[in-house]
Amino acid sequence: MTTPTRLRLQILPPTSLPTHPALAPTQTNSPPIDLSTFIRETLRESLHFADTTIPSSFTKKGAPKPSPPSAAKVQFSTYEEPTTGDFWAARSSVHVDEVGEGTASYEELQGGLFEEHSVHEMDYTPDVYDARRICDWGSQIKEMGENPVGGEFTPVLELYEMCHNLPTPLTHRCFSTLVLRAKTAADAFVVVQLPVDISKTDAAFYSNGRHRSEGEAETMQREKVLMGRYVSVERVKPVVEGGAEAGEGGAGAGGEGGAKRYSWEMATSSDAAGYLPMSLQKMGIQGAVVKDVGFFMKWRGEQRKKA
């Protein structure tokens, strides 16, 4: 078993990221991190984790759970990485490729989970109150003249600060995360998030405390935050008929008339920091990750009504 290099809770400093003007004052390393190599290596490690580690090493915890209004049930599983000690929690569900109550078509999954991933996460997750984009590498990727991962789908690399509202007396949590989004096929994609430290970067907003004076007045943007960290891999792909997909057999796992189905998987390791013991965090993680499926389907249904 190989030790994870980037897919771990260890926070990446700016010197471990591809060069970007917004991070330049804190990127004094020479030679700089090559953007194309960084994307390829991160994607390769993440896909290996999704294809190999999750199915072979994660342990399912009980039967699939409901996550209303999702028609599909959600399988929860966990894993402790032996070399880093990182505790991972994962969920998986299978959804009929239809525009209908409790499910979503592939186009809707891609539009909500791949495109503008972080912004939409704020839209459908009740406790996320800000998704602040710090920078992206779009122009640098375009200047390469070639796709760093091959094929016709160009990857997206961007840096966000994600802020979560926690109930009183707990302090809000903010996570600075590097987000890599990549299509792996015409109807499949992966989203990878890595913890980063941008606290000494002027472009940051929450990590360096700038929000306390520049956040929107009389909103949570001005309130104190604690910086946590998380790493995650999220993947949507077609179900291979005859394969043993998690959640299969639950409501919504099979489509009428042979409708195509898609697997939605997400695995994460996190540390909310502060005075929240890891034991308590582990106790609450199952409910949180299972509910996300229902949150998304509810939001997706609301968006249809607005269209």
Image: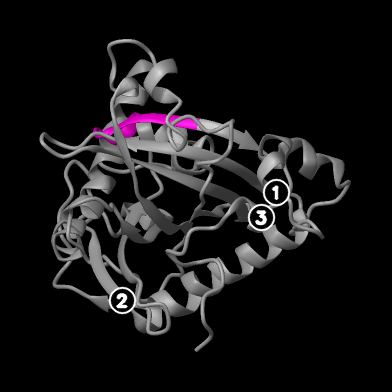
Q: Which residue is mark 3?
A: 15
- N-terminal label among 3 and 1: 3
Magenta residues (range): 123-132
Q: Does the segment drawn in magenta span residue 273? A: no
**How far across and down, in percent of the image, does residue 260 sit?**
43, 55
**Tag 1 or tag 2, which sits nearer the N-term?**
1
Q: Is residue 128 magenta?
A: yes
Circle 1 Cα neighbour tier, 10 Å, few/some/many (<14 / 14–19 / ≥20): many
Q: Earlier in the sequence, mark 3 or mark 2?
A: 3
Asked if residue 117 is positioned above or below residue 248 in the image, the reply reads: above
Q: Is residue 223 visible?
A: yes
Badge 3 vs badge 1, beta-carbon distance below 8 Å: yes
Give SS at disc 3: helix
Q: Residue at x 76, y 50 (%)?
A: 152
Quadrant for residue 202, please give it: top right
Report the amino acid beneath label 3. Answer: Thr
Q: Nearer the viewer, residue 26 or 89?
A: 26
Give the spatial CA distance, label 3 vs label 1: 5 Å
Asked if disc 2 and disc 1 are in contact, CB closer than 8 Å, the reply is no
Residue 213 percent across, percent down from the top left: 41, 17
Type of amino acid under label 2? Tyr
Q: Tell me if mark 2 has few (under 14), some (14-19) or many (20+) residues whose alpha carbon lies within 10 angstroms of its own.
A: some
Q: Which residue is under mark 2?
A: 79
Read off the residue under disc 1. 27
Residue situated furthest top in the rendering: 217
CA–CA distance between discs 2 and 1? 34 Å
Q: Is residue 69 left or right of residue 239?
A: left
Q: Secondary structure at mark 2?
A: strand
**Whether residue 137 is visible:** no
